[in-house]
Amino acid sequence: MAKVRIGFSTQFELENELVGIGTDNPTNTLQALGNIRSSDAKAVGVTTLTTFDGFTDTKLSLQGSGGAKQGTTSGEIIIEGSVDVSTGATFRSGPENLAVTDNFTLPGISDDKPSVGTFRFNENLGSLEFYTGTEWRAVNSYSRGNAAGRAVIAKGNTPSSPNGESKEMGYLNISSLGNSTNFGELTAGRFLLSRVSSETRGMFAGGDPGPSSVDIIDYITIASEGNAIDFGNLLSSGRCAAGASSSTRGLFLGENASNVISYVEISTTGNALDFGDLSAPGSPGSKGTGTSSPTRYIHYSGSNSPSERIDFGTIASKGNSVRFGNHIIGGYSHEGARQNRACSNQTRAVFAGGYVDISPYPVQSLMATITMASEGNAIAFGDLTVARYGVNTTSNQVRGIFAGGGALPGFFNVIDYINFASSGNATDFGDMEGRVGNAVSDSHGGLGGF
C-alpha cells in the first residue's frame, strides 16, 4: 500500500498508517500533543486520557447528562449537571472532601434505605456506625487490654459526716494495692448517689444531703485531682438511683424506687433526658445497683418485690428494660438485698454485699455473678472479707474493687478486690472509710460502647 504524507509544517502527520497531531513521530494510531477540545464526542470501547503521572489536571470539569461513569482523579473536582457515581468508584481522600453544588448521593448510604453493612459517621456521638438491617450500631474499636486505670470514690457517709453530708472524694489505682488518697470535693455533700463514667469523665448524680434529696449532677476529670463541677440536673430530685454507662452515654436507673430511666451524653453538659422504664419499679426504700457491658446495662432493684429480678437493656437505643434473670440472696429467697452493689468488666458482672430489710437486718458478704451477654440467673462467686452494705464499687477489665461499706451503725475501713476471671473470695486491697457513696473509673466494663 502506498504511503501518503499530508503535512502542515509539523502540525499534522500521517506516516506508517499512524496519525500525529503536534508531532512528526507518532507512535500510536492517533497521537495528539497539546490541548484538545471536543464537543459531542462519543468514545466506543475503552478510552484512557492521561496527563502527567497518570492523573487528570488539578481542576476537572465534567459536563453532560450521566456521561461521567468512572475515572481516576486527584485534586479539586467540579461536577456540573447530573452525574452518576457508581459503586465501583474509588475515593482516595474521602467523599467528605467533595464540594457539591447539586444533589449527590452515595449508593447504599441513603438515610431512607441503607444497605446492610453500610457505614456512617455519627457526628452527634463522634463514632463510626454500621447498619445491621434493622438499626445503626456502633463499631467497637476500643481496646485497652489489661490496662488498669484510676478509680474515684465519692465516699457518702464518713465518720466525720455520719449523716451523709460528706463532700469527700478519694482515688486509687485499681491495678495496685494501697489506701485511697484525697481527690477533691463534690459541689454538695450527699450520700446514696448514682454514678456513671467514660474513659475521661466521671459523674455523680442525685443523692441525699439531708433532710431531702437533690437533682444535682456533678462531673470530674478522672485523670486530674480537683473539685467537681456542675453538669446539669436529673429529671427530678432523687436518691438511690443505680448507674450504668458506655463510653458516651450514662444511665440513671430507678431513682426514688421508681421505674424511671434517664440518660445524659457524658461528653456534654446539660440536664438528663427520659430514656425509658424499668420492667418493674423497686418497692419504697429500695436501694438498687447497676453496671454495664459495652452494649448492655444491667439493673438489680434490691427491693422486696420482686426481690430477685435482674433487668437489662441496650445503652445505645432508648426503650424499656426486659428481664435478664434472678439474683441469688444467700438464705433469703423472698427478700431483696438493699445496698447491694455491682461492678463489671466487658463480659462479667459481680454483685456484692447488702442487707436484708427485715429484723434483725442481717448484713451479707455474698458475691454473685452473671455473664452479661446471655440471660440467666446469677450464681455464687465468693464472699467479701467482711459482710457489709453500701460498698463503693467500680472496676477495670481485670479487677473489681469494693471500698468501704458499713453495718449499722458502724463503718468498715476496708477495700477489697476480686479478679473477674476466677471465682473466689475477695482479698484485702487497702483502707478507706466511707459507705453508700459511689465510685467511677476510666476503665470499667461498659467502655468501648456507645
Image: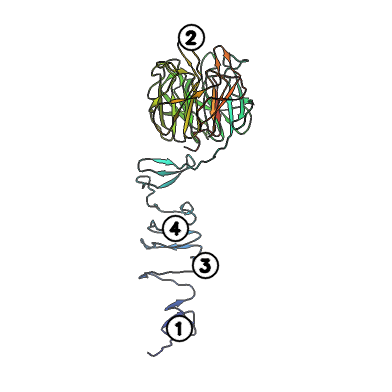
What percent of the width, then of the height, locates residue 205?
52, 24
Circles 2 and 3: CB atoms closer than 8 Å? no
Q: Amino acid at mark 3?
A: Asp
Quadrant assignment, res 139: top left
Q: How many marks?
A: 4
Along the line of sight, the residue nearer the viewer: 67 or 355: 355
What percent of the width, then of the height, locates residue 31?
45, 77
Name the element at disc 2: loop
In this figure, which residue is indicated by the disc labeled 4? 90
Residue at horizontal 38 percent and vertical 22 percent from the top: 280
Rate crowding at label 4 as few (under 14), some (14 to 19) or many (20 or more) other CA atoms within 10 Å.
some
Circles 2 and 4: CB atoms closer than 8 Å? no
Residue found at the far bottom of this picture: 2
In this figure, which residue is indicated by the disc labeled 2? 360
- Mark 1 or mark 3: name the one nearer the start of the chain: 1
Comparing marks 2 and 3, which lies closer to the viewer? 2
- Image quadrant for the N terminus? bottom left
Along the line of sight, the residue nearer the viewer: 148 or 166: 148
In this figure, which residue is indicated by the disc labeled 1? 13
Please say if 304 is above or below 197.
above
Q: Is residue 301 left or right of residue 144?
A: left
Along the line of sight, the residue nearer the viewer: 353 or 37: 353
Q: Amino acid at mark 2?
A: Pro
- Mark 4 or mark 1: name the one nearer the start of the chain: 1
- Mark 2 or mark 4: name the one nearer the start of the chain: 4
- Mark 2 or mark 3: name the one nearer the start of the chain: 3
Q: Could you tell me how far apart the alpha carbons at marks 1 and 2 are, in whole angstroms?
A: 110 Å
Q: Is residue 160 left or right of residue 105?
A: right
In this figure, which residue is indicated by the disc labeled 3? 53
Rate crowding at label 2 as few (under 14), some (14 to 19) or many (20 or more) other CA atoms within 10 Å.
few
What percent of the width, then of the height, locates residue 417?
56, 27
